[in-house]
Image (spheres, rainbow, N blue to C red):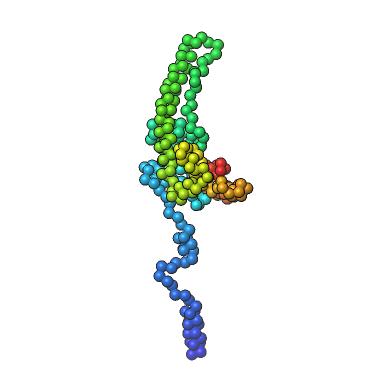
C-alpha cells in the first residue's frame, strides 16, 4: 500500500508539471520555421515564372545571376533585333551596336581582289544588321526595363525605389544601372552605409557562401562569381 501511494503521488506531480497543449500550438522549432519561411515570388511571364529578383535572404544573391541570364536570353529571343541589349544585360555593360565604320581590307593586294570583295560583302551585311538593331534599340531597352521591373518582388521594388539617384535611373530608363541596383540589393550591398562596413558585409557573404548537396560545381562557381562582383 505504501508503494501504491508513492506511485500515485509521483503521477499527480508529473501531471501538474505538464502544461496543457493549446490548439494550434506546435513545438518552438516548428514555430520558428513557420516564422522564418518566406513564400517565393513568381511572375506570370511564360518561361520566366521562377526567374525573379528578390531580397532579404542570402540565397537571392546567387539567384540574381541565374535570373539575369534567363531574362537576357528571353529578351534576345522574344524581342526583334535585341542581341545588343541582351549582351549588355549579361555583362552589365553599356548597350553598344558593334560595327566598323569602314571595312578593313587586306594590305598589299589590289582593291578589286576577290578576297577584298568578300570582306566588303560581309561588312555590308553586318552594317545592315547593325542599322536594324539601332532602329529597335530604344524600344528594346524600354521593353527590357519594364520586364526587369516586372520580375522584381514588391520587397525588391521598394528597396530599389529607396536608393539615392533612382529617380534619375527611372527617368532615363537606364536598364543597366537598374540591374546594378537590383544586384546590390540582392547581395545586401547598401551604398548608403559606411564604406568599410559595406565591404566587410560583402566579404562575409562571399566567404560564408557554401555549396549545397543539390548544387552542381558549375552552378556553385557561377553563384560564387556573382558574389565576387559585388
Q: State the residue lying farthest toward the right.
A: 196
Q: Is residue 213 above or below residue 84?
A: below
Q: Quadrant of the C terminus?
A: top right
- Residue that appears at 51% across and 35% down: 93
Is residue 104 found left or right of 131 in the rendered image?
Answer: right
- Residue that appears at 55% across and 13% down: 107
Q: Is residue 79 above or below residue 198?
A: above
Q: Is residue 216 visible?
A: no
Is residue 171 found left or right of 45 in the rendered image?
Answer: right
Q: Is residue 120 visible?
A: yes
Is residue 139 found left or right of 230 in the rendered image?
Answer: left
Q: State the residue lying farthest toward the bottom.
A: 1
Q: Position of residue 95 (x, y in %)?
A: 48, 32
Q: Is residue 30 above or below residue 39?
A: below
Is residue 46 found left or right of 6 in the rendered image?
Answer: left
Q: Position of residue 183 (x, y in %)?
A: 51, 44
Q: Position of residue 11 (x, y in %)?
A: 48, 81
- Residue that appears at 47% across and 17% down: 119
Q: How many marks?
A: 0
- Residue that appears at 52% across and 45% down: 164
Amino acid at each position: 500500500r505504501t508503494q501504491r501511494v508513492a506511485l500515485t503521488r509521483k503521477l499527480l506531480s508529473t501531471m501538474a508539471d505538464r502544461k496543457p497543449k493549446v490548439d494550434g500550438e506546435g513545438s518552438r522549432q516548428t514555430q520558428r520555421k513557420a516564422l522564418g519561411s518566406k513564400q517565393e515570388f513568381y511572375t506570370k511571364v511564360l518561361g520566366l515564372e521562377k526567374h525573379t529578383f528578390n531580397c532579404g535572404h542570402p540565397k537571392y544573391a546567387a539567384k540574381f545571376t541565374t535570373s539575369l541570364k534567363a531574362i537576357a536570353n528571353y529578351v534576345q529571343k522574344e524581342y526583334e533585333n535585341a542581341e545588343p541589349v541582351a549582351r549588355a544585360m549579361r555583362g552589365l555593360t553599356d548597350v553598344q551596336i558593334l560595327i566598323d565604320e569602314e571595312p578593313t581590307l587586306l594590305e598589299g593586294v589590289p582593291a578589286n581582289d576577290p578576297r577584298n570583295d568578300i570582306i566588303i560583302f560581309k561588312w555590308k551585311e553586318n552594317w545592315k544588321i547593325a542599322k536594324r538593331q539601332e532602329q529597335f534599340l530604344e524600344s528594346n531597352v524600354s521593353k527590357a526595363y519594364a520586364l526587369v521591373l516586372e520580375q522584381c518582388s514588391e520587397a525588391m521594388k521598394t528597396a530599389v525605389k529607396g536608393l539615392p539617384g533612382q529617380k534619375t535611373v527611372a527617368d532615363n530608363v537606364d536598364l543597366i544601372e537598374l540591374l546594378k541596383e537590383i544586384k546590390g540589393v540582392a547581395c545586401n550591398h547598401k551604398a548608403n552605409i559606411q564604406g568599410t562596413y559595406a565591404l566587410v558585409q560583402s566579404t562575409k557573404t562571399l566567404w560564408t557562401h557554401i555549396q549545397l548537396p543539390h548544387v552542381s560545381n558549375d552552378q556553385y562557381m557561377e553563384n560564387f562569381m556573382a558574389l565576387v562582383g559585388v
